[in-house]
Structures are given as structure tokens and as C-alpha cells.
Amino acid sequence: QKALVWLRRDLRLYDHAALHHALKNSQQVWLTFIFDIDILEPLRTDNIKNQALSHDRRVDFIWQGLQQIDEALRKQGGGLIVQVGKPTECIPKIACELGVDCVYTNHDYEPSAISRDAAVQASLNKLNIHFESFKDQVIFEKKEILTNSNTVFSVFTPYKNNWLKTLQEKHIASYDCTPKKGQFAAIPKSLQSPLPSLESMGFCSTGIEAYLPPGSEGGQQFLEDFLHRIDQYQIGRDFPAIKGVSYLSTHLRFGMLSIRGLVREGHRRMLAGSMGATIWLSELIWRDFYFMILANHPRLSSGVAFKPDYDQIQWESGATAKKLFSAWCEGKTGYPLVDAAMHQLNQSGYMHNRLRMVVASFLTKDLGVDWRWGEAYFAKHLNDFELSSNNGGWQWASSSGCDAQPYFRIFNPITQSEKFDSEGKFIRRYLPQLEKLSKKSIHAPWEAGHIELEAASILLGRDYPLPIVNHDEARKKTLVRYSVVKKVN
Ligand code: FAD
């Protein structure tokens, strides 16, 4: 038996469901990754006009992860087959050329990926090649966790309780991926080619490795660092200026770390009484929850509100909306915590969870801009962009989602700033022009007196924007805007 393992968002060689089954069932195993032009193309469109290379940290991060896998496979006599093209064409071709009996892969829950996989499977079956797909990126999928009346959950806490009750050792056991000698087969000449360079695909290096070491090696390094801090997670996780969270989301997104491994670490410590690990595990369950929601409500990928009533809301439109949105994107709203958060995203591709909630609330409930615009901006810029969690997070913030916050609970960007960045340390890191403001004034510079502003060499409107909206007025406007929603949660 010969097998091909098709890697997608599971870029590792350990504890990997598809790889485990391929190794178990076959004498010879090859691995492949396809840079899907249908995914790359929209990422390049901005730059095509200027003929310049596109800057996308994710493509770079994936590319570096693939390099690690290729190296590891070469050491064992194999290598990674990497092509640029359409998987529906490349996978059957490669499978034929290798003469494999089966293509192994792991489930993907995004509607576009599901139809792609169905098309690949149909082509393979016509060639008498089997297609096997496995659960790998979540602990429980689709309808594995149901309510007592056998329906899908739409509220997180009871889902989490049931998830924890259902969890057994077998759900988080590691898949053995140790090859026998020679099982990773050499790549035949006709398929041998070096890893396509980023430039050949229209992308440039982004320098992401300087702060986010790629691959399983990088993920492991971050995990070990976090495990020293995990017991304090519940204390530090809401404060963006301190190293309180794990920063593992991007490695998880691309499967450079196994979710089973992370849950094992969290669960074991939870049973030993660690409050930090308990809360962290709960965050990993949120991730499963949103995957489950997307799998059961695929319509969410087409931009509709989870609660249909919320699609009646009239958002700001025309030039006003565009102006407000640009100020938000560029971190020029005049609200320091919001602006610093947007600078963090624009500069690094990461944004702290507390800040994602603050800026999403600000866009929808202070600026009255459609949550879908924010969702799309995050999708373009987040290194860890995940359709399920991103959609879930945005719909949570705009109150249109499952188990979302009630629409009348509106974050106050100033009190959020005072509470979660009380010294203004995070703000100062991203808005150095506000460096000299006191810890009282830094949250709302327009409230600082002339003397303080002058001493800090700040002229509002020149060195830092005046607030583009008044929060109290915006709040009132939002309550009116949301009043079209008939059913209150
Ligand atoms: P930690 O606090 O260390 O959490 C550990 C892991 O748990 C994360 O890596 C992530 O996989 C998962 N997790 C944590 N919080 C959530 C959550 N609320 N929902 C789902 N999973 C969670 N997360 C993404 O992975 N991709 C996204 O595109 C994304 N978009 C978001 C958009 C908005 C508007 C909001 C409010 C949240 C979004 N999140 C998203 C969730 C969360 O902000 C990030 O997962 C987290 O900030 C990543 O940092 P970390 O790895 O240090 O998290």
C-alpha cells in the first residue's frame, strides 16, 4: 500500500491523525502541500496594480513551517512535495504520479474547504484512489456534543460543561507518527522541485520569524514558555501590557501544535487544581465551540447574522461610514486604547483578546459601522485568522451572535482603558507621542488640561487626533439603532 498525506492547516509531523493512519496502513508514505492559488490570489490583489510583491505574514509563516517539515522529511529519506495551483487538479495528479492507493487528510470545517474536499474526493474516486479524512483540529466536532434533547448548543457554558463531562483520555491521546525505516519514501524525479520561493508566488518576506518563531519548533518554544506562566493565566490574561496569555493562536491556526497536546497540558493542570489552567482550557473550548457553530451553521460564512433580526440594523453608510472606518483601521480615532490596539494589529498581525473585544465594540457601537467590515479587516490582517472564531468574536461584540453580549451592554472605551491598561503602558508602547501624559490623562487626552498637554508637547489634532465621536452620544445613538431588533436576548 502507498499513501499520500495532504497537509493543509496541520503543518506538523507529530500527533497528526491523517499521518498516523497513513503510516499505519501503508508501506510508503509521501506528504504534499499545495499553495492554493484561489486562496493566494485575493491576498495579492492589493499589490498586483503596483506590480510589487505582496506582504502577507501568514503566507510567509506557512512557508517557513513547510521548510521545517521538508528538512525533517529529507533527514528521513523523503521530502515534502510542494506545488502552487488548484488542489482539485494538483492532488489527483500527484496521487496518480506516485501510484498511491489512498490520499489521507484531516477534516476542515469551512464551507469552501468542504466543497473543495468533495471535489478532490470525487476526482480521486474516479481514478480508483481512496480519500480518507480524519478529525484532527478539534477535540469534539460537528454533533459530538449535544444538548439533552439532541440539539446543537448555541450557548457556551452548558456546551463547555458537557464538553468537559464527555472528555476522556482517548479523546486527547497522541497519535503515534513514528515512521518505520524507509517509510517516508524518496520523491520520484518527476515530482522533485525545490520549495517554491515566496517571490515566485508574488510575496515578500515579512520578518515574522523575529517575533513568532515558525513551525512546531517555534510553537513548542512558545508553549514551554507559557507553561511556566499558565498558573497565573487568570490574573494576567486581561492586561495587554503584560505577558499574560499564551500567544499560541497562530501555531494552532496552522496546526504547528496539536490541539490534543494543548488540551492535555491544560486538563492535567486543571485536575491538579490550577485556576489558570482551568480558565485557559475554557478558552480552548471556546475555539471548539466556534468550530462546532460554523460546522452546524455554514450560512455564517456568507456574512449573515446568527440571529437574523440583527440583519435589520441600519449601519452608517456612504462617505461617513468610510471615514469612520478608515480612522479605525489606521488607529486614528482619538481613543488611545483603541488606536494602540489597531497599531498592534497593523504592526504585528496580533491583537490581544481584550483589545479585540474593545475595538470590535468600538467599531460597531461607537462608530455604528457594520461588524462585517471589521470582520473582513481582521481576516486580512490577523496572523491567527480563523473564520469560525473571528466570525464568532465579531458577532459576539455586535450582539448578533450565539451567546453574544446583550446589545445594551456597550463597552466604554475609556473605562476599559483605565481598568485594563491603568498605567497606560500598552498605550505608550504603540503611541509614543502620548508618552509624557500622566496615567490619568492618557486614557482620554482631550480631558487633560492645556498645561499638561503643553508640557507633554501635544497639540490635539496635530500630534494626536481629537476623538472622532463622543462616547455618551454614540451610546444613545446605538441604543436607537439597535431598537429595530425585535427579540431582545
Ligand atoms: P490565549 O488567551 O492564550 O488562549 C489560548 C487559545 O484559546 C487561543 O490561542 C485560541 O486558540 C483559543 N481562544 C482564546 N480565546 C478565544 C475565543 N474568544 N474564541 C475562540 N478561541 C479562543 N481567535 C483566533 O484564533 N482567530 C481569530 O480570527 C479570532 N478573531 C477574533 C475576533 C474578535 C472580534 C474577538 C473578540 C476574538 C477573536 N479571537 C480569534 C479569539 C481570541 O482573541 C484569540 O484566540 C486570542 O487573542 C489569541 O491569543 P492567545 O493565543 O494568546 O490566546
Image (spheres, rainbow, N blue to C red):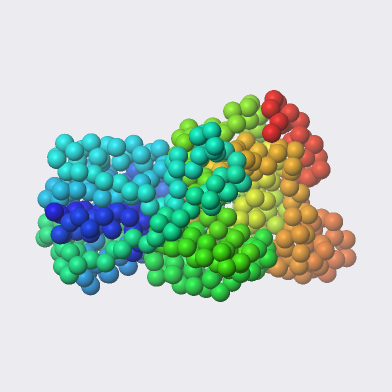
Quarter-of-image position of residue 441: bottom right
User: In which quadrant of this rendering is ligand 1 seen?
Assistant: bottom right
Position of the C terminus by quadrant? top right
- Left-right relation of 94 to 72: left
The answer to whether one can see residue 2 in this image is yes
- Left-right relation of 201 to 382: left
- Left-right relation of 287 to 326: left
In the foreground, 214 or 131: 131
Q: What residue is shown at x 45% (from left), y 39% (from top)? A: 143
Residue 178 to residue 327: above or below: below
Q: What residue is shown at x 23% (from left), y 59% (from top)? A: 23
Q: Position of residue 31 (x, y in %)?
A: 24, 57
Q: What residue is shown at x 17% (from left), y 56% (from top)? A: 26
Quarter-of-image position of residue 238: bottom right
Q: Position of residue 201 (x, y in %)?
A: 32, 54
Q: How many marks?
A: 0
Q: What residue is shown at x 17% (from left), y 46% (from top)? A: 93
Position of the N terminus by quadrant? bottom left
The answer to whether one can see residue 389 in this image is no
Quarter-of-image position of residue 322: top right
Q: Position of residue 356 (x, y in %)?
A: 62, 52
In the foreground, 269 or 230: 269
Residue 288 to residue 482: above or below: below
In the foreground, 120 or 184: 184
